[in-house]
Structure formats: structure tokens, C-alpha cells
Image (spheres, rainbow, N blue to C red):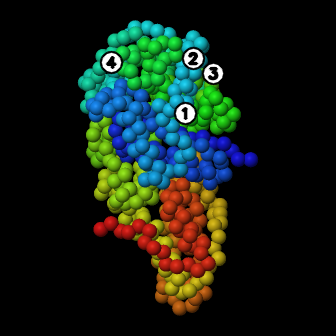
Amino acid sequence: MLKKYYITTTLPYVNAEPHIGFALEIVQADAIARYRRQQGDEVFFNTGTDEHGLKIYRSALAQNKEPQAYCDEYAAKFDDLKKALNLNYNNFIRTTDEHHIKAAQEFWKRCFNKGDVYKKKYKIKYCVGCELEKTESELKDNKCSIHPNLDLEIIKEENYFFKYSRYQDKLLELYKNNLEFVIPDFRLKEIIKFTQRGLEDFSISRLKEKMPWGIPVPDDEKHVMYVWFEALINYISCLGWPDNLEKFNEFWPGTQVAGKDNLRQQSSMWQAMLLSAGLPSSKQIFIHGFINAVGGQKISKSLGNKIDPFELVEKYGTDAVRYYLLRNINPVEDSEFSINRFEQYYNADLANGLGNLVARVSNLLEKNNIETSLKISSDATLRSLFDQKMQEYKFNEALEILWNKLRECDEIITKKQPWKLDGKQEIKNILMPIAQNILNVAELLFPFMPDTAEKIKKIFLADKIKKSEILFPRIS
């Protein structure tokens, strides 16, 4: 019987075009989804776009567009990542979808009926970039540390609030009983400390006359839902909740992939909301690091220094971009990105490494007219090491294991120099184990570089092996 597995990314705001930071997140989620499918699981992989809120409303007005038309245009650009990065998600949700709107309103009613929603007047310092209230401890020189280029705004009005404070003890119990609830462990410790300091109720609505672009609050036409309340509900509305409970119960709870600036929202606020609505908590939350420019500056669309993933793919190819993001960007720590660094690893690992090895072996097999009958087989040691790293989301270390195996193959062929030998059987005895190892590596490589893996398998599973095309042309 197939095991059900659900994974989702966060939903990026559609206030700008896709950048490399979100490309990292969705490629990581894609690698996990492909790996789980290889394991035999039935995978539901969700992504999409977050389309409400003040900064999207203002961005639309700045371009003299209706908010919905603006969202339609930018949502399509994020969905274009599916082809560019060869993603295998099977659901793309938009928070302007009719079903999501109805689900968010039903979720609101459940929290309201639980007694966790109330009205009050308040005054806060607000970062439009984060769409979050900012306390003094989160500010530096009276600026948001994540969006220092934006001025904080003062919001003073009557809104609906969620009784976040009611769930402090229940959240601490959740973390205590699920030590792998947040990965990596230092992020779990971070959210535990945050929760132990005490939770303050947060606003979950905005006055419609000031900010009309949002989902209407049930039974109150003067308010729309605050984006951080309704957008999180996509993680269950995409599964058909509350209408299709059979599908929801099959796949929920699931795994969420998110950046470190989403830690509080995903692992605390969202979990409190689920408890209020009487629904199970998420299964696991994997928190990835950021991609920084050289010198440590965060790369983001709000700071105007984004790297365009479409341009990278156009120049270097999909699998090269996927490889770099998964191999050379630390899964949980911040990492720097530069084109020079990208090209160095491209040449070393792909052109001179994997690509050259495949070409050398296939060329020698063809040149010596060696017939093969290879099949994908399991290298138990290789597989065990690889599986352990994948289950821990250590993509870089999983790939290092595969490249170590490729280096071993390279060293053997360089040492034994089969091109200098005359005996066909002797040459075959050297090349066949190497070809088998390359084939086994290709099978494990599929979640990371699906096109390349399939090309390699096609080469080495053929009865008559021909010299391969150049997989990765060297960059001069």
C-alpha cells in the first residue's frame, strides 16, 4: 500500500518577480518530493502564491493595475518556475482561489467559535515588507532588520485579534514531545526560547476602507483578514479542507519547507491557529538558510539585489542550477552566491567531473566495441549513507557521497589507463564496474538532477553503448 506524503513550500508574495531565494526553497522541496516518490510514496507537493496584503495592494496601485489583474500576471511568472527548474509539484494554489477564500472563512469561524477571536483598538509599528508588527527588540535604528530600506509605519485602528497568548503552554508541549518538529535543532531551540518569553495576541484583520485587498471577515463587512492569518491556511485548503476531508485526512499532517524569516509564523503562529481550529499540528518544518551576495548582504527582491533564476537557467542549464543550489548552498545556514563561484563549481564538478567521467567511459566502451548488459542495482553501503543524509535534509552531504563515488571511479580509470591496453576482456574488466557505479549514482542523482540522471541511465542501460554527448560544456 502506498504511503501518503505531503510537502509544501511557503507561498511567495507576488509583489515582484521570482528570485534565487525562492528558487532555493522550491528546488529543495522538489528534491525531497522526488526522493519520496522514488521510495514508493504517493506524494502531494504544493506550492503557489500569496496574493493579499498591503504591499501587494500598493504594488498594484503603483502600476495602475487592478489587484487581481496584477496578481494574475505575477502568479504566472512563479508558475513558470515549474518548467525552468524542472519542478514536479502537482498543486499550485493561489490565495485568491475561490476554494481557499471559503476555507479561510470557515477556519476563521472555527477560531471565533472557540473564543479565540476578539476586537480591540491598538497602535503598532508595522513593517510592510514583512507584513508584521515589530517590537523594539526587533528593530535596529528604528528599522526592520530584514527590510532596512523600508520605513516603519504606525497603524492605529480597531482590529480583530487572535488569542495567541492562550497557546503558550500547548506549543511548548508540542515542541517538547516532538524533538524533530523543527529542523535543524537550533531553530527548534530558537522558537522554544521565543515561546518561553511569552506570546502576545496578534491582529488578524484590517479595516477594509484602508486596505480593501483581502478576504472578507465573516459577518463583518468592514474588515478583511490579515494576510498572515489567511495565507497560512493554504497548507490545508490545498488538500480540499474543509470539503474533502477524506483527502485531507490522508495527507495531513505534512512537511513544510520555509526560510528562517518564516520560523515564527510557520512553527508557532500557524500551530496555535491549528490548535484553535481543532486540527492536527504540522508534521515537520524544515527551515533553510538564505542566499547572500558576496560580503554577506542578503539577496532579496525588497532590497533590489535579486538574482534572476530564469537568467541562470538560460545561460547554464536547469540541472546545473539545481546542482549548485543543492550542493553548494548550505541547507540550513546562510551561504554566499556569486557567478564566479558558480562557474568554478560548474567546471570542477560538472564539466570536468561528472560529465568528463561519463564521456571517458562511454567513449572507451564504444571504441573497444564492448557489449554490456548493465542493470540498475543497489550498492547497499552507498544507498544507506545517501538515505541517511536525505532523511536529514542534508542535500549537500548526500551529493558529496555521490561525488566521492564518482571520484573513486575517476581515480581507478586514471590509474589503470585502459586506453593503453590491447586486450578487450582486460579493458572490459576495468570499465564494467565503473560503468555500473556510474549507473547506480545516476539513479540516486535523479531527485537532484533529473534530466542528467535520465541521460546517463539511457547511455549505460543501452545494449550497445555509444559515446555520450557533452553533458556540461566547460565554461572558459
Single out the mark in the foreground, 1 or 4. 1
Q: Residue beneath label 4, please?
A: 125
Q: Quadrant of the C terminus?
A: bottom left
Which of the marked residues, 3 or 1, is nearer the chain's N terminus? 1
Q: Distance between the residues labelled 2 and 3?
A: 12 Å
- Marked residue nearer the N-terminal end (1 or 2): 2
Disc 1 and disc 4: Cα gap in Å?
28 Å
Q: Is residue 161 above or below residue 4?
A: above
At x 36%, y 11%, the residue is: 157
Amino acid type of disc 1?
Tyr
- Please say if the residues under marks 3 and 1 sit with CB atoms less than 8 Å apart: no
The mark that comes first in sequence, 4 or 2, is 2
- Where residue 262 appears, as percent x and y from the top left, is 44, 32
Front position among marks 4 and 2: 2
> Which residue, given by chain and number where applicable, does mark 1 sit on?
235
Task: Tell me the SS state at disc 1.
Answer: helix
Residue 428 vs 153, above or below: the answer is below
Q: Where is residue 258 in the image (x, y as percent from the top left)?
A: 47, 37
Residue placed at 36% from the left, 58% from the top?
314
Q: Identify the disc placed on residue 278.
A: 3
Type of amino acid at the residue the image marks with label 4? Lys
Residue bearing mark 2:
109
What's the distance in space between the residues labelled 1 and 2, CA to CA? 18 Å
Mark 4 or mark 3, earlier in chain: 4
Q: Classify mark 3: residues with Cα within 10 Å, few (<14), some (14-19) or many (20+).
A: few
